[in-house]
């Protein structure tokens, strides 16, 4: 990880750039998505977390990410599979489509 800063959407705001982190024996690469939920532009970030063949997405408050020691485990736990929705429950084997 490095401490370079990336400009955010608001002039004068910056966040720490983190290219990857290690958690439970896996390496997660991080991309900050350019879009966030409507009305959260100045308060939140959308992070894309990529490990092996898995891609997950999480929205977090800017100060949650822009800290010397973010809680990576919490971010991964809160994340959803890319393309998934919080409103749609995952299908279980044998359930009707």
Image (cartoon, rainbow, N blue to C red):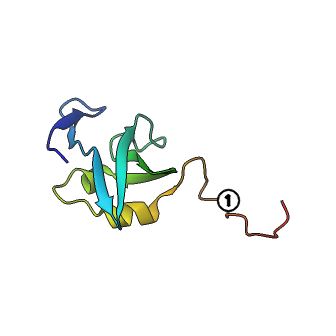
Q: Position of residue 22 (x, y in %)?
A: 30, 59
Q: Is residue 89 above or below residue 4?
A: below
Residue 40 appears left or right of 89: left
Residue 95 appears left or right of 72: right
The residue under the point 72% across, 64% down is 91
The residue under the point 81% across, 69% down is 95
Q: Position of residue 40 (x, y in %)?
A: 41, 44
Residue under numbered circle 1: 88
Q: Quadrant of the C terminus?
A: bottom right
Q: How many marks?
A: 1
Q: Position of residue 10 (x, y in %)?
A: 27, 32
Q: Position of residue 15 (x, y in %)?
A: 22, 42
- Residue farthest to the top, as pictured: 11
Using the image as rendered, state which of residue 87 and residue 33 is in the foreground.
Answer: 33
The secondary element bearing badge 1 is classed as: loop
Q: Quadrant of residue 25?
A: bottom left
Q: Residues within 10 Å of mark 1 (few under 14, many from 20)?
A: few
Q: Is residue 60 above or below residue 93?
A: above
The residue under the point 67% across, 64% down is 89
Q: Is residue 59 above or below residue 76?
A: above
């Amino acid at each position: 990880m490095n401490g370079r800063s990336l400009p955010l959407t608001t002039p004068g705001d910056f966040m720490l750039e983190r290219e990857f982190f290690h958690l439970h024996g896996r390496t997660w690469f991080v991309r900050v998505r350019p879009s966030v939920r409507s009305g959260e532009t100045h308060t939140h970030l959308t992070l894309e977390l990529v490990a092996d063949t898995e891609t997950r997405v999480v929205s977090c408050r800017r100060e949650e990410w822009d800290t010397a020691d973010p809680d990576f485990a919490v971010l991964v736990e809160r994340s959803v599979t890319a393309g998934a929705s919080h409103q749609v429950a995952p299908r279980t084997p044998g359930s009707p489509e």
